[in-house]
Amino acid sequence: MKATGIVRRIDDLGRVVVPKEIRKTLRIKEGDPLEIFTAKDGEVILKKYSPMGEMTEFAQTYADSIGDIYGFGIIITDADSIIAVSKLSKKDYKDKSITSDLEDVMLGRASKYLEGEEVVSICRDDSKDYHSQYIVPIISESGDCIGSIIIIGKDASEQVQSEEKAIKLAAAFLGKQVQ
């Protein structure tokens, strides 16, 4: 665990303020849900809650199925990080934070096909060794953007946009799984 040197007091209603610097670093916005855990040694751990995080195994199976059928690289994210990877190097993507560029596409709540110089980095260390990507936000029943499905085309001959309906179907299905 990383020490920050920041100390906060609990007020008379039992509240504590998470410092702005930490909220910014962890992309915690007003209204974001947090999970609270306790450790044996008296630590209280706050973790940003992800409804997609509960579906990681399911999302991985789903990504593998889509990847096997279409042969393209598949990435499934929650609102902050990559939770499933198929047909791409897991060590390059899995569990890494998404970029603000990808987050902007997701928050636009519209599917987006990008190719060539337009492709966005998916994670910070992304080498962008692909030619095209089709990004489909996952929208929950309540209307919140909770993640995305990204299909990756490695070279110009791969037409990832032709799989648009399948990826939209996958995103809609995953969105309905979250209450």
Image: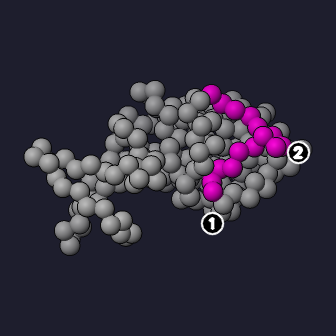
Magenta residues, as a range?
A: 110-124
- Name the one closer to the observer, 66 or 96: 96
> Please, which residue is most extreme toward the bottom here?
41
**Spot occupied by residue 28 in the image (x, y as percentages of width and height):** 41, 46
Instruction: Give the residue pinned by disc 1.
Output: 91
Residue appearing at x 83%, y 43% in the figure? 116
Position of 67 with respect to 173 (left or right) is right
Q: Does the magenta portion include 111? A: yes
Position of 62 with respect to 56 (left or right) is right
Instruction: Please identify the quadrant where the N terminus is shown.
Output: bottom left
Position of 7 with respect to 161 (left or right) is left
**Spot occupied by residue 47 in the image (x, y as percentages of width and height):** 35, 54
Q: Earlier in the sequence, mark 1 or mark 2?
A: 1
**Spot occupied by residue 165 in the image (x, y as percentages of width and height):** 69, 29
- Name the one closer to the observer, 123 or 160: 123
Instruction: Give the residue pinned by disc 2.
Output: 156
Q: Is residue 170 visible?
A: no
| Residue 36 image label | none
Q: Is residue 111 visible?
A: yes
